[in-house]
Structure formats: structure tokens, C-alpha cells
Image (spheres, helix red, strand yellow):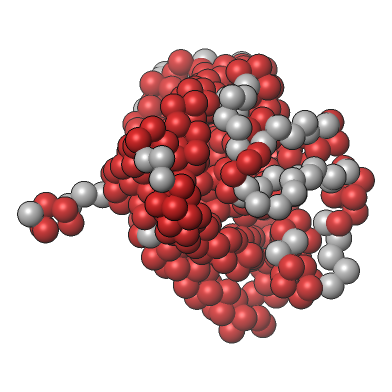
Amino acid sequence: MISKLKNISLGNWMLIGMVLGFIVGLILNFYVNDPFIKDTLLVNNIFYLGGTGFIRLMKMLVVPLVFFSIVVGVASISDIKKIGAIGGRTILIYLVTTALAVTIALIIASIIQPGVGLNMAGLTQGTVTSNATLTDTILNIIPENPFSSLANGDMLPVIIFALLVGIILAKLREKTQTVNNFFTEGNEIMLEMTRIVMKFAPIGIFCLMAKTFASLGFDGLLPLAKYIGCVLIGLAIQAFIVYPALLVVFTRLNPIRFFKKFISVMFFAFSSSTSSATIPLNLEKLSELGVSREVSSFTIPLGATINMDGTAIMQGCAVMFAAQAYGIDLGLSALLTVVFTAVMASIGTAGVPSVGLITLTMVFNSVGLPVDAIGVIMGIDHILDMVRTAVNVTGDAICTIIVSFKNKSIDLDIFNGKKAPDKTWDDITQF
Ligand code: ASP
């Protein structure tokens, strides 16, 4: 029996936590009228402790995880001069596609309005305000004192500082090898810590769901389903409309040929929920599509670190979901702040399972949304993580093809199936 339980994957435990929390919450909502047991004992003590405790654990990870991940990602860019020519173009396309992705998510979520009907304002202690202006946000990305930004969890200046440290490490190479090793190992520590914290996710999700549904009852169900719908629609638009359109506009290549070859990479990303682990397969399929290794071996690992269009779509929908649930009207400047911060969050999201949820806290913070709402969407995040990772890796590949096309580093005969790929990937294991 115990060994059978051990075989259940973490994702499934999270799902079990969500379903049980939902059932317990509904039972409390409908059948328990004793306010001492329901509210005093369970909702405001036990579930509050388990749920808020877990959210605090997640918040604990954000600053060091994002900081180390960016420093290591940027520092690993091999030869700064060599990549100079394609580097700028690649980064620009990565950032623009991510901004487009969040914008699509915000539009869809403002049409579908997933959070309407989920009245969460009464569930959170403290006042809820949204007072960010875009000029403040832009100005605030320049750290006056990086250490106080780290200490206060001001993510944008932290990201800028991390980018600078990473660029300088990449430039100084051997001279700074010790510090480089420190950051690489620090990154490993944070990834391991994330894995450990995530082991508690099923309990945290159970408590958060039970607490929410004990107060909301069945009213909470439809918004959650609408939220899932929003994210999936956004992901489908990005993958099957935006990417093919970009491919046609910038290269005139046939998107169907691309997807026929690439679908296996999407499946792998879907089942593993990690862009990083998908790097070798992504490289292999791109070389089968005629993309030169010189470009892809730079753009794909970089994309797996900084380009997360699928994650940005989830974050855009989550922000709207929470704002609607709390009855907060996000004005234009707050929405622009969300786009900007979600692009930054995408840079700071490591390509491993669930990290998008952790960096979501920084997007919420940027416009003053209470992070408690993350607890509600967390239970169903595993399946969305799978789908968005498939979109993340597709975005990396599409941008790579566009960059190689502009750089004349793609063999169009191979892409169009008129010629077999020259070599097979025998050295992909280095990634
Ligand atoms: N699992 C995603 C990836 O690896 C990141 C995330 O959104 O959590 O691309």
C-alpha cells in the first residue's frame, strides 16, 4: 500500500490535494454550521497555517532563485563577441514574443473574466490597493542599492543587477571563475530547495482550497474552470496562430512542415514540464529542419532560460483572475506594469517544473495584488505547466528559425525536405 502511494507523482499528489481540499471546503460550507469548528478552528487556524505557511515558503524562494538563475543563465553565454551579431536580435525577438503573449492573455482574460463571481475580497486580511504607475516601474528598475533591493524583494532592480553581474562574469571568464562557480552552485542549491518546497505543495494546496471553498462553496468552481479555459485558449493562440504567423511573415517558411517535425519536442516538453530537459531534443529537431548548430546551440539554451511565452500567458491570466476576484480595477498603467514585469519574470523563470508559479508572486506584487489568489490556481497548475512548457519550447524554436533565416544559417532545402540533414547530432549530450 505504502509503496503504491510512493509511486504517485508529485503532480498527481497536487491534484489529489486540490480535489480533497475542494471536497472538504464544500462540506464545511454546506454542512458545518458551528462557527467555532468551521471558522475559528479550521479555516482561520489550521487551513490558514498550512496554506499561508506554504505561500511563505514559495515567497522565500523567489529572490535567490531568480537572482542565481539569471546570473548563471547570462554568464553561461559562451563567447560574448561571437554571439554579438545574433545575440541582440535573438534577445529582442524573445522579449517581444513574450510581451505579445502576456498581452494576448490579458485580452482573453478581460473578455472571459475568469475571476468574476469569485468574491475573494473578504478572504484576505489587509487592504488591497493597486497603485503602480508605469513611470515608477521603469524608474524603479534601476537599483539605487542592489542589496536593499534584494532584501526588500524588489524584483525588477534585482533582475537588472543580476543581468549585469551575469554579463560581467561572461566577459571576465577565467578571472572570475571562483565567483562563477559560487553562482552555479548557488543555483543548484536553489533548484534543490524548490524541489523540496514543492514536496509540501499538496498539503499547501489542500489547505488553501479547503479555506477558499469553505467560504465560497460552489461559487468558486466556475471561475476556476474559466481560468483554465483562458490559459488554454491563450496558449493555443500563441502556439497555433502567433508562431505560424511570425514564421510566415519573417521567413515565408511553411509552418506545417515545422510542426510535423517539431511535435515530438512539444510532447516531450509536455510530459516533462521542463524546457531545460528539452534542450537536446529541441536542438536535434532543429538541425533536422536545417538550422545551423552555431545559432541553435546559443539560442535554444538561452531561450530555455529567458524565453517563457507560455508561462507569461499563465501569469497574465492569473493576474486578471486575481484582480477580478478581489474586485480591483487594473488601469492601463497597471496593465503595462504587468506586461513589463511578466516579461522580466519570464527571464527569471528557470526552465523546470512549477517555477512559473513562484515568479508569479513577483508579478502580483508589482501591482499590489494579494498573493493568496495563487493558492486557488495552484491546485490545477500542474496540467497547465505541462501545456505551457510545450509552448515555451515552441517559442524558442520559432525564434531560432527566424534568427537563422535572417542570418542565412538555415538550409532551406533541408527545411523543405528536398535534402537530408547533413549530420546527426552526435554531440548533443553536452547539454
Ligand atoms: N515548467 C516551465 C518550463 O520549464 C516553467 C514554468 O512555467 O513553471 O518552461
Left or right side of 320 for 278:
left
Nearer to me, 309 or 260: 309
Q: Residue at x 55, y 45 (%)?
A: 374
Query: Residue at position x 38%, y 21% from top?
Result: 260
Camera sees residue 347: no
Residue shown at the point (51%, 46%) measured from the top left: 375
Residue 144 position by quadrant: bottom right
Residue 187 image offset from top left, x and y in percent? 52, 69
> What x and y, as percent, mark residue 240?
52, 19
Residue 145 lies, in percent from the top left, at 84, 72
Q: Residue at x 41, y 40 (%)?
A: 33
Which picture quadrant has residue 32? top left
- In the rendered image, which quarter contains the N terminus? bottom left
Q: Residue furthest left?
A: 1
Q: Quarter of the image for the C terminus: give it.
A: bottom left
Q: Is residue 86 left or right of residue 212?
A: right
Position of 431 with respect to 186 (left or right) is: left
User: Does residue 189 lie above or below 271 as drawn?
Assistant: below
Residue 10 is situated, as x and y percent measured from the top left of the image, at 31, 51
* In the rendered image, the vertical position of residue 173 relative to residue 394, given as above or below: below
Whether residue 113 is situated above or below residue 64 in the rendered picture: above
Q: Is residue 110 visible?
A: yes
Total marks in image: 0
Pick whichever, 161 or 410, lies toward us: 161
